[in-house]
Amino acid sequence: MNKLHDLSTELNTLAIFRSILNDDLIKNFQELATSTYSLESKDLVLHIYGDFVSKLFNKTSSLTRYIAELVLSDENFYIIGKGAGKDFDKVIESSLKNELDILDRLASLTPEDAKSIINYRGFLPVWTNEPVNLTNLYMEHLSNLPISGYGIYAKYYAFVLAGEEVLPILHPDPQRLSELPGYERERSLIIQNTLALIEGTGASNVLLYGDAGTGKSSTVKAILNEYKDKGLRLIEIKKDQLLQLPNLLETLSVNPLKFILFIDDLSFNGNDDSFAALKAVLEGSIASRSKNVAIYATSNRRHLIKENMEARMGDDLHENDTIQETLSLSARFGLTVTFQAPDKDNYLDIVKHLAREYKLALSEKDLCTKAEAFAIRNGGRSPRTAKHFVQIQAVMQLEGEEGNDTKS
C-alpha cells in the first residue's frame, strides 16, 4: 500500500473543493505521491519531499493547520450558496462530507507515513500534526458566516477596489474610537447607523461633511476597527470607480457580511458621469439597494459639486432646475453628519485629552498657550492640528529625556 498515492488519487475526485488542487503545496504533495508510486530515482523523490516541506515551513510547521486554513478560506460555490441562504441537494451534501473526510486524512498525514514509503535512512525534515475534525470545523464555520465571512473577507476586513477586483489592505489604519476625542454626538449618530447595518434593521447611507482635519475619515476607520469582529467590512472606492458601483453591489448582495463602501473626500465637477452613477445608486435606480451595504462618504463640500458664478448664473434657461440638480445628490444620503471646526474651548479640550494619552509633562497653562500659537501658525483649530501639536511636543519631550540620560 502507498498511503500518499491513495490520498493523491482521492484528491483528484474533489468537486466542491476543486480549487484546492491549484494550491502549490497540494500540487507538490501530488507530485511527491506520484514519484513514490512510479519508483522514480531516490534523489528525485527526496528533492520533491524537500520542496514539499519547504513550502509548508514557509507558512507553518503544522500540516494540520495548513490544510484547515486552506479548507476554511476556500471560496467555492457551496459556501457562497450557503452564505446566500441556499439549500443544496442531498447528493451535494453527501459529496461535501466525503471531501471533508479526504481532506481530514490529508491534514492528519504524518512524516512517518511519508518516510516509511520513501525508505530513506538519512535525516528528513518533519512537520507536526494536531487533532482535528474538519467536518465539525467546517460546519461551525458555516454557522458563523454572518460574522466570519468566507474567502478573502474571512481573512481581512479592509479592502480597496482595484479595477474590477476587490483587494485586501494588508495593514489597515489601527485608529480606535477611544483615540478620537471630541465630536461624541456626531460619532454617536454614525455608530447607531452602523449598528443598524450590522443588525440588519435598516441603515442609511451617510455623508460626513465638514472642515478639513475634523476627523471624518478617522471616524469611519475607527468604527470599522470597533465592529469588524461583528461581521463588518469596508471597501474603499475612488471617485473615478463609481461607475462600477452597480456591479459591486450586485456581488455583495448575496454575501452574509455587512459592508461599508467608503468614498473619501468626495466632490464633483459640473459635468461628471460619476455624479449620475452615485445618484442612481443612492436613490432612484430600478435595482433596490441591499440591506447589507451602506455608502459612507466624506466631503469638505456640503453639496458635493464644485460651483462657480458662471455655473450658477450661466445660460441655462431653467436656472432653478440646475441648482436643484446640484443639491439633489447630498439630499439622497439618508444621514448627513456635520463636523464643524472646534471653537477655542473644544480645541483645547482635545489637546488636553491627547496630552494625557501621550503623557506630556507640560503644565496646563503652557500646554494651552503653545497649542493656540501652533493653531494660529498652522491654519486654524482642528483635531488634526491638535494631534500634530501633541505629537511634536511628545517627540521634543522624549529627545529632552534622552539628552538628560546622555549627560548623566
Image: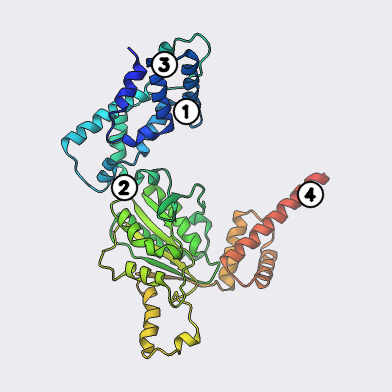
Q: Which corner quadrant holds the N terminus?
A: top left
Quadrant position of residue 72: top left
Residue 124, percent across and down? Answer: 51, 16
Please tell me which of labels 2 and 1 falls first in the chain: 1
Q: Name the spot of residue 120 as percent of width and height, x first.
A: 48, 10
Which numbered marker is on residue 397?
none
The front one of 365 and 155 is: 155
Front: mark 2 or 3: 3
Q: Which element carries disc 1, helix, strand or loop?
A: helix
**Image disc number at residue 114:** 3
Rendering quarter of residue 348 = bottom right
- Label 3, residues with CA under 10 Å away: few <14, some 14-19, many ≥20: some
Report the amino acid beneath label 4: Gly
Question: How many numbered marks, from 0 up?
Answer: 4
Q: Which residue is mark 1?
A: 56
320 on left or right of 88: right
List x then y, in percent, for residue 158: 44, 51
**Does residue 292 lie above or below 57 as drawn?**
below
Q: Residue at x 36, y 34 (%)?
A: 20
Residue bearing the label numbered 2: 146
Closer to the camera: disc 2 or disc 1?
1
Q: Earlier in the sequence, mark 4 or mark 2?
A: 2
* Amino acid type at mark 1: Leu
**Vertically, is 334 above or below 173?**
below
Which kind of residue does numbered mark 3 sit on?
Ala
Check the picture and name the quadrant holding the C terminus.
top right
- Give the CA distance from mark 4 to mark 3: 61 Å
- According to the picture, the residue beneath numbered tag 4 turns out to be 403
Q: CA distance from mark 2 to mark 1?
A: 30 Å
What residue lies at 39% left-to-right and 20% top-to-bottom? 33
